[in-house]
Image (spheres, rainbow, N blue to C red):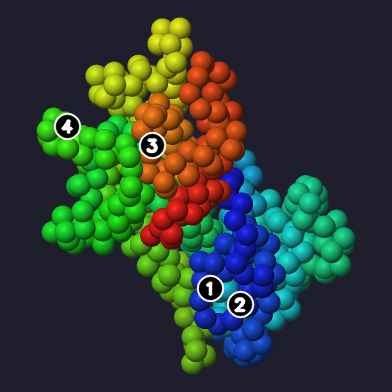
Amino acid sequence: MEDMTTTSPSVATVLVGTGPLSFDDVVAVARHDARVELDPAALEEVRRTRGVIEALADDAQPHYGVSTGFGALATRHIPVELRAQLQRSLVRSHAAGSGPEVEREVVRALMLLRISTLATGRTGIREETLSTYVAMLNAGITPVVHEYGSLGCSGDLAPLSHCALALMGEGVVRDAAGERMPTSEAFAAAGLTPVELREKEGLALINGTDGMLGQLVLAITDLRRLLTVADLTAAMSVEGQLGTDDVFAADLHALRPQPGQARSAANLRKLLQDSAIRDSHRDPEACTRVQDAYSLRCSPQVAGAVRDTVEYAATVAGFELASAVDNPVVTPDGRVESNGNFHGAPVAYVLDFLAIVAADLASISERRTDRFLDVARNHGLHAFLADDPGVDSGHMIAQYTQAAIVSELKRLATPASVDSIPSSAMQEDHVSMGWSAARKLRRSVDGLTRVLAVELLTAARALDLRAPLQPAPATAAVVRALREAGAAGPGTDRFLAPEIEVAVQLVASGDAVAAAESVTGPLD
C-alpha cells in the first residue's frame, strides 16, 4: 500500500497558520519531506489561548481535560501535583496500537494535520510543545504507528498517541534514514529535547481526525490521477476492440449534464482523435455492429460518476482541513467548551464512498480486458492475444490477476462506517470506524492501480496486433512509452509478472498519462 508516485513536490516549504492547509501542502510534507514553518501570527494566537488554560489550571472548579480525568473517568478531579502525571499517563495508556506499521507517508500526514489544528490556537497547547512537534517532523523522525487501535472516535486516539509518546521522548520511531530506534536516540541525534506535557496538552495532542483525514487527502490525490488513466485505458480498449467513438460526442453527453461524465467523454475524444484503426470501420456498410458493449460505450458514464464522487469527497476533506478538532476547545472569545467535533462520521462516510467507486471503476476495466481475450468478442484477434493459442496462453492469467483484485475490491467496498462498537464504559457508545475505512481505501487504490495497469498492458498488445492499421497518435504514444519502459510487444509467452509491474509503475508514476498528453495536451 505504499505510494508509488514519483512526481516531484510542488511545495518546498509549507507555512502552517490559523487557516486551512491545501491538498498540495499535505502531499508535499507526507510524500516529499517539505519543510514545515509556523506562521508568527499563529504562534501569537497559541500563546494567547494558552493563557486561558493556565488561568483555569489554578481554578478550584474542575475543568475537563485540564483538571479532570478523561472519557468515562472525567468525574475525577485531579489535584495540581498529579496533573503532569495525568498527561503522561493519558498518552502512555492510549498508545495501545497493535499490528503492522503504518506507512511513513500516512504518519507524516497525520502529524502535519495535528500541527495544523494546534496552530489554530483552539487547543490551548504551549508554543514550545508545538514547536518541538514541528521540529520532530522536520527532522524526519517518524513515530511507529500501528494498523489497529483507532475507532475513529474520539478521533484517531491510538495513532495520535504514538506520535505524542514520541514527542515525550518515549516509544519507538524511525529516523530520516528509515532506521528503527528508541525515540530517545533519535531525539539526541537530532538535537531535540523531549517535551514535559502540562495541563490539557496530552488531550490536545491526541484528540482529532488527522489520521483518517490524511489518508483521505492522499487517496483523493491518487484517485484523481487514476481517473485520467481510466479514460486512457478505456480509449485504448475501445480502439483495440474496433469500437466506436461516436457515442462520446459532446452533444450526446450534454443531454445528461453530469459534470464528471462530460469530462471523461472529452478525454476520450481527444485520445481517439485521428485513429486509423477507428477510421478503418467507420463506414456503416462495412461495420455491421449496431452498438458496443456497456463496458466500452458507458465508460464515461461510470468513470464520470466516480469523478463526481471523488470531488464530493474532496469537498468534505476541504471542510475538515479548515477544522480545529479537539475536545474541549478554546473558543475565540476565550471559553473552554466540550464538544463532539472529534467524531469521524463525515470523513468515514466519504472514505467508504471512495472504496465503492474504486471497486466499480476496476470492475469495468476488468470487463474491457476480458473482451480482448475471447475470440467470440475480440473481433478477429487470437484467443487470449496468444502468439500460438494452445501452445501459448497470452494474457489469460493476467485477466485472472485482475479478477482476483476486483473480487477483493468488492469486499473492501463493504462500508466500515456502518459498524460501531461501544467503548470507554459506554461513554463513547457510537463510533465512526473512520480509520478502518481509510485503511481499506488505501488497499483499494493500490488494487485499482494494478487493474488499470493490466488493461493498459493488454490493450497495448491488441493495438500492436491491429497492424498495419495504426492507433491514434495519443494511444500510440502510450504504447511506445510502455515498450520503452520494458514491456515487450506481442510474441511467444514469457515471464509476465515483471511486465505487469512495468505497467503498474507507468500508471502510478503518471508517465502513461504524460505520454498521451504529449500529443493531446492536458487531459482533464
Mark 3–mark 4 CB contact (< 8 Å): no
| Viewport quadrant of the N terminus | top right
Q: Is residue 5 something that shows in the picture?
A: yes
Snapshot quadrant of residue 116: bottom right
Identify the residue at image location x=39%, y=29%.
467
Residue that label 3 marks? 470
Instruction: Determine crowd level at label 3: few under 14, some 14-19, many 20+ residues with C-alpha closer than 10 A.
Output: some
Residue that label 2 marks? 16
Distance between the alpha carbons at the discs numbered 1 and 3: 47 Å
Q: Which one is closest to the eye, mark 1 or mark 3?
A: 3
Residue that label 1 marks? 21
**Picture layout, residue 249 above or below residue 485:** below
Of residues 221 and 452, the one drawn nearer to the viewer in this rendering: 452
Which amino acid type corresponds to the residue marked 2 in the rendered image?
Answer: Val
Identify the residue at image location x=45%, y=50%.
516
Give the mark nearer the N terminus: 2 vs 4: 2
Give the mark nearer the N terminus: 3 vs 2: 2
Which amino acid type corresponds to the residue marked 3 in the rendered image?
Answer: Gln
Left or right placement of residue 349 versus residue 11 in this view: left
Give the mark nearer the N terminus: 1 vs 2: 2
Instruction: Determine crowd level at label 4: few under 14, some 14-19, many 20+ residues with C-alpha closer than 10 A.
Output: few
Snapshot quadrant of residue 318: bottom left
Residue that label 4 marks? 287
- Coordinates of residue 512 in the picture (x, y in percent): 50, 46
Of residues 111 and 373, the one drawn nearer to the viewer in this rendering: 373
Judged from the image, the secondary structure of the residue bearing numbered disc 3 is loop
